[in-house]
Image (spheres, rainbow, N blue to C red):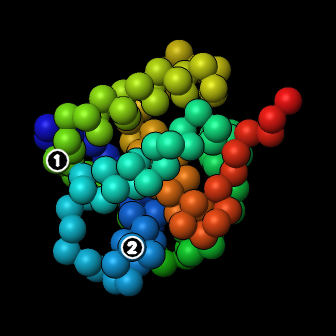
C-alpha cells in the first residue's frame, strides 16, 4: 500500500541510523517503507512489553542528539505491506490509550517503532516492569 506522510526530523535521523545498523551504510538503497517494515518485524514479539512512554523520552545515541543540520523533515510516499500498515494502525489505537490522547498520527507511531528497533539492536530496549 502507498501512503503519503511527512516524517519528522528525528524520524529521518532514526531511519538513517537504522540503515547504518542493519546495512552498515546510512545511504543503503532500501525504501523507507521496507525499512519501517523491517523495524516493526524486529520488535513485533516484544510489542506488548515495550514501555512506549520511556521509548518516547529516552536519549538514543546518534539519533536524539544528532546535530546534523542537513537532515530535515521529509514529505514522502511510503510503500508499506498491507500487514505492516495494519500493525501500524493497531499501534495507533494502542498509543491513544498509552499516551492518553484522542488522536494519534502514523508518523509518530513510525518514529517510536524506529526508536524501539534501534534500542533493541543496541540491547537497550525498554520494557515495562513486571508487577
Whether 87 is drawn above or below 59: the answer is above
At numbered mark 2, what does the secondary structure look like: helix, strand or loop? helix
At numbered mark 1, what does the secondary structure look like: helix, strand or loop? strand
Lower sequence index among marks 1 and 2? 2
Q: Is residue 4 left or right of residue 111?
A: left
For discs 1 and 2, the disc positioned in front in the rendered view: 2
Q: Is residue 1 left or right of residue 38?
A: left
**In terms of depth relative to the viewer, which is nearer, 32 or 10?**
32
Whether 60 is drawn above or below 47: the answer is below
Query: In what quadrant of the picture does the C terminus appear?
Result: top right
Q: Quadrant of residue 107?
A: top left
Residue 79 bears which disc, if any?
1
- The residue positioned farthest toward the bottom in the image shown: 24
Percent across and percent down for residue 121 are 54, 67
Query: In what quadrant of the picture does the N terminus appear?
Result: top left
Tell me, yes or no, if residue 26 can be seen here.
no
Residue 24 bears which disc, if any?
none
Residue 22 bears which disc, if any?
2
Residue at the spot 44% in from the left edge and 54% down from the top edge: 42
Whether 55 is drawn above or below 97: the answer is below
Tell me, yes or no, if residue 84 can be seen here.
yes
Q: Is residue 103 left or right of residue 88?
A: right
Residue at the spot 56% in from the left edge and 75% down from the top edge: 62
Residue at the spot 30% in from the left edge and 29% down from the top edge: 86
Q: Quadrant of residue 46?
A: top right
- Mark 1 to mark 2 CA distance (whole Å): 19 Å
- The residue positioned farthest toward the front in the image shown: 45
Classify 10 Å Cα crowding around label 1: few (below 14), some (14-19), many (20 and above).
some
Classify 10 Å Cα crowding around label 2: few (below 14), some (14-19), many (20 and above).
some
Q: Are marks 1 and 2 in contact (CB under 8 Å)?
A: no
Percent across and percent down for residue 57 are 69, 50
Amino acid at each position: 500500500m502507498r501512503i503519503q506522510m511527512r516524517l519528522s526530523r528525528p524520524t529521518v535521523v532514526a531511519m538513517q541510523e537504522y540503515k547504518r545498523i542493519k546495512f552498515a551504510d546510512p545511504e543503503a538503497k532500501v525504501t523507507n517503507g521496507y525499512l519501517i517494515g523491517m523495524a516493526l518485524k524486529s520488535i513485533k514479539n516484544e510489542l506488548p512489553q515495550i514501555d512506549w512512554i520511556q521509548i518516547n523520552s529516552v536519549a538514543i545515541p546518534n539519533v536524539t542528539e544528532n546535530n546534523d543540520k542537513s537532515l530535515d523533515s521529509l514529505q514522502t510516499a511510503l510503500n508499506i505491506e498491507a500487514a505492516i500498515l495494519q500493525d501500524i494502525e493497531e499501534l495507533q489505537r494502542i498509543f491513544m490509550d498509552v499516551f492518553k490522547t484522542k488522536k494519534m498520527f502514523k508518523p509518530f507511531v513510525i518514529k517510536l517503532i524506529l526508536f524501539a528497533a534501534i534500542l533493541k539492536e543496541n540491547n537497550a530496549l525498554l520494557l515495562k516492569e513486571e508487577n
